[in-house]
Amino acid sequence: MHRKTKDYLDEIDFWQKARARLLQQAAQLRRHQGDAVTPDVSRALLDDLLHKCGLDTLRRARDRAGQHGPETTGNPPPRDPLD
Protein backbone atom coordinates (compact mmCIF):
# COMPACT_ATOMS: atom_id res chain seq x y z
CA MET A 1 0.00 0.00 0.00
CA HIS A 2 1.30 3.44 -0.84
CA ARG A 3 2.31 5.67 2.04
CA LYS A 4 -0.15 8.42 1.02
CA THR A 5 -3.00 5.90 0.94
CA LYS A 6 -2.08 4.63 4.40
CA ASP A 7 -1.86 8.20 5.75
CA TYR A 8 -5.24 8.97 4.20
CA LEU A 9 -6.82 5.87 5.78
CA ASP A 10 -5.23 6.71 9.13
CA GLU A 11 -6.70 10.20 8.93
CA ILE A 12 -10.16 8.82 8.14
CA ASP A 13 -9.87 6.42 11.07
CA PHE A 14 -8.84 9.27 13.39
CA TRP A 15 -11.84 11.43 12.43
CA GLN A 16 -14.26 8.51 12.69
CA LYS A 17 -13.02 7.76 16.21
CA ALA A 18 -13.19 11.46 17.13
CA ARG A 19 -16.78 11.59 15.86
CA ALA A 20 -17.68 8.47 17.86
CA ARG A 21 -16.17 9.99 21.02
CA LEU A 22 -18.09 13.22 20.47
CA LEU A 23 -21.36 11.35 19.98
CA GLN A 24 -20.74 9.25 23.08
CA GLN A 25 -19.94 12.32 25.18
CA ALA A 26 -23.00 14.13 23.80
CA ALA A 27 -25.20 11.18 24.79
CA GLN A 28 -23.75 11.26 28.30
CA LEU A 29 -24.35 15.01 28.54
CA ARG A 30 -27.96 14.56 27.36
CA ARG A 31 -28.55 11.95 30.07
CA HIS A 32 -27.35 14.42 32.70
CA GLN A 33 -29.19 17.37 31.15
CA GLY A 34 -31.76 17.29 33.95
CA ASP A 35 -29.10 18.67 36.27
CA ALA A 36 -28.95 22.44 36.45
CA VAL A 37 -25.95 23.38 34.33
CA THR A 38 -24.88 26.98 34.09
CA PRO A 39 -23.65 28.29 30.72
CA ASP A 40 -20.09 28.62 32.02
CA VAL A 41 -20.04 25.00 33.17
CA SER A 42 -21.50 23.74 29.90
CA ARG A 43 -18.95 25.77 27.92
CA ALA A 44 -16.15 24.32 30.06
CA LEU A 45 -17.48 20.81 29.43
CA LEU A 46 -17.60 21.47 25.69
CA ASP A 47 -14.08 22.93 25.68
CA ASP A 48 -12.81 19.89 27.60
CA LEU A 49 -14.53 17.52 25.18
CA LEU A 50 -13.12 19.30 22.14
CA HIS A 51 -9.65 19.26 23.70
CA LYS A 52 -9.86 15.51 24.33
CA CYS A 53 -10.82 14.94 20.69
CA GLY A 54 -8.10 17.24 19.38
CA LEU A 55 -10.59 19.76 18.01
CA ASP A 56 -9.89 22.63 20.42
CA THR A 57 -7.89 24.54 17.80
CA LEU A 58 -10.98 24.67 15.58
CA ARG A 59 -13.01 26.08 18.46
CA ARG A 60 -10.43 28.80 19.16
CA ALA A 61 -10.30 29.72 15.46
CA ARG A 62 -14.09 29.99 15.33
CA ASP A 63 -14.16 32.13 18.47
CA ARG A 64 -11.49 34.46 17.07
CA ALA A 65 -13.43 34.80 13.83
CA GLY A 66 -16.56 35.69 15.82
CA GLN A 67 -14.76 38.53 17.59
CA HIS A 68 -14.73 40.55 14.39
CA GLY A 69 -18.51 40.67 14.29
CA PRO A 70 -21.17 38.77 12.40
CA GLU A 71 -20.74 40.80 9.25
CA THR A 72 -17.23 39.45 8.68
CA THR A 73 -18.15 35.78 8.96
CA GLY A 74 -19.07 33.73 5.94
CA ASN A 75 -18.42 34.54 2.33
CA PRO A 76 -17.94 38.14 1.20
CA PRO A 77 -20.63 39.55 -1.09
CA PRO A 78 -19.81 39.48 -4.81
CA ARG A 79 -18.28 42.65 -6.22
CA ASP A 80 -20.06 42.43 -9.55
CA PRO A 81 -23.78 41.59 -9.75
CA LEU A 82 -22.97 39.15 -12.56
CA ASP A 83 -20.68 37.08 -10.30
Image: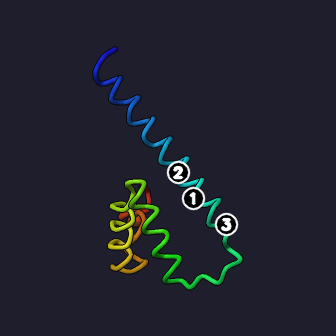
- Of residues 65 and 79, the one nearer the viewer is 65
Q: CA distance from mark 1 to mark 3?
A: 9 Å
Q: Tell me which amino acid carries mark 2.
A: Arg
72 horizontally vs 25: left or right: left
Name the image quarter holding the C terminus.
bottom left
Whether label 1 touches label 3, CB < 8 Å: no
Q: Please, is residue 57 above or below residue 20 in the view? A: below
Q: Earlier in the sequence, mark 1 or mark 3?
A: 1
Name the image quarter holding the N terminus.
top left
Q: Secondary structure at mark 3?
A: helix
Q: Secondary structure at mark 1?
A: helix
| Location of mark 1 (residue) | 25
| Location of mark 2 (residue) | 21
Q: Residue at x 30, y 17 (%)?
A: 2
- Of residues 73 and 79, the one nearer the viewer is 73
Q: Position of residue 33 (x, y in %)?
A: 67, 73
Q: Residue at x 52, y 48 (%)?
A: 19
Q: Position of residue 52 (x, y in %)?
A: 41, 57
| Location of mark 3 (residue) | 30
Q: Residue at x 71, y 77 (%)?
A: 34
Q: Tell me which amino acid carries mark 1.
A: Gln
